[in-house]
Structures are given as C-alpha cells and as structure tokens.
Image (tube, helix red, strand yellow):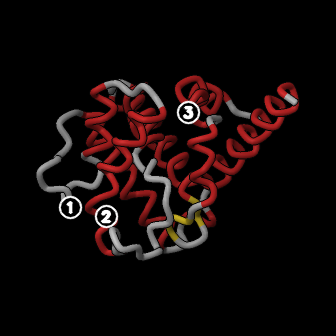
Amino acid sequence: MLNNKLIEFHTYVKDLSTSDTVMQMDHYMQHGDITTLEHVLAVSYVSFLLAKRLGADVRSAVRGAMLHDLYLYDWHIRTPDRAPFTHAFNHPAKAVENAKKYFEPTEKELKIVRSHMWPLTIFHMPTSKEAFILTMADKYCAWNESFGIYDESALRETIKTYMVYIKKLRAEKNKKQA
C-alpha cells in the first residue's frame, strides 16, 4: 500500500513510470545491484521531496528526474561508438533524444535532463532550481547506491514498495488487453 507521499508522487509520474519505455530501464544495471529503473525512481522521489520543500516546480523536477537516465543501453559494455568512461559525459544527450522520441517533455524538462551531469557537462550547467535539484538528487542517490548506503535505507524500501505497485498496475493493464 502506498503512503500519502507516494500517492502524490505517483500523480506526477504515472504515465512515465508505467510505460513500456521506462520499464526497459529495469533491464540495465546502474550502480552496484541497482537497476536504472530503481535509480531513476529514487532520484525522482528525492527530487519530489526537495522540490516540495524548496517551493520549486514539482512537476518539472520530478518528470525531469524520471527521464534523466533514459539512455536505454548497458553503459558497462563497450561498443565501437561508446566506451564506458564516456558515458558520464554523453548520456544526458541520449536521454534527451529518447525523451523526445518516446514522450512529450517540456523544454524545461529537457534542460533539466541535459544539465544533470554538471559539472562534467561543463557547457550545460543547471539554469533552474529544478535542474539544480536533480543534479544534487542524482549525486546523492548515486553516492548512496555505489557505496552500499542505499541498501539499508528507508528510501530503498519506499522505492521497492513503489516498484511493486507500478509492476502490479502494468500486469493488470496487460491482463485487460489480453
């Protein structure tokens, strides 16, 4: 069962979090044993909490966070056009490209996504409160995921609860379509 904060969070992301495209992120590892889907949900939820607290545009912050790693590939695997060390610099552009291809993000959301790896993406620095929130939330979650801090956190339990919920919604939807 979702708590009130997760119910409100879901109102901002339900079309994204239950989409086939976003669900593909559950097939790619992000940091340690965390999938890209779990990572973007954690970053989105932290962005949601911060945007509410700081009086920012919650919708743009949360939706930008949901799309920030929509690159849809395993960044650990080297290909002729992609070496693992270049991922941090290049994936925001791929996420923007995919966001435009599969969804209808606002220009503000696209700028939020494009700047989330600042300062690595030196020419794309955050230009809004929401973009700065995503940049910080992403680094906070990545740090916690990479060093095992996330494993024992209440945030992980919250996100796991939400993942069970959205997978249940998808199963019900697929059952109705069958």
Q: x, y percentage for residue 122?
A: 13, 56
The answer to whether residue 117 is left or right of residue 65 is left
Q: Amino acid at mark 1?
A: Leu
Crowdedness of circle 2 by 10 Å Cα count: few (<14), some, many (20+)?
A: few
Q: Which x, y percent locates residue 159?
A: 63, 48
Say few, some or many: other residues with alpha carbon within 10 Å of mark 1 (under 14 / 14 to 19 / 20 or more).
Answer: few
Contact between marks 3 and 2 (CB within 8 A): the answer is: no
Q: CA distance from mark 1 to mark 2?
A: 7 Å
Amino acid under label 3? Answer: Leu
Residue shown at 71%/38% (left/top)? 166
In the figure, 14 relative to 143: above or below? above
Res. 120 mark: 1
Among the 4 quarters of the image, the one containing residue 120: bottom left
Could you tell me the amino acid type at mark 2?
Ala
Quarter of image, res 98: top left
Which residue in the protein does label 2 denote? 88
Disc 3 and disc 2: Cα gap in Å?
23 Å
Q: Which residue is mark 3?
A: 16
Q: Earlier in the sequence, mark 1 or mark 3?
A: 3
Q: Are marks 1 and 2 in contact (CB under 8 Å)?
A: yes
Q: Secondary structure at mark 2?
A: helix
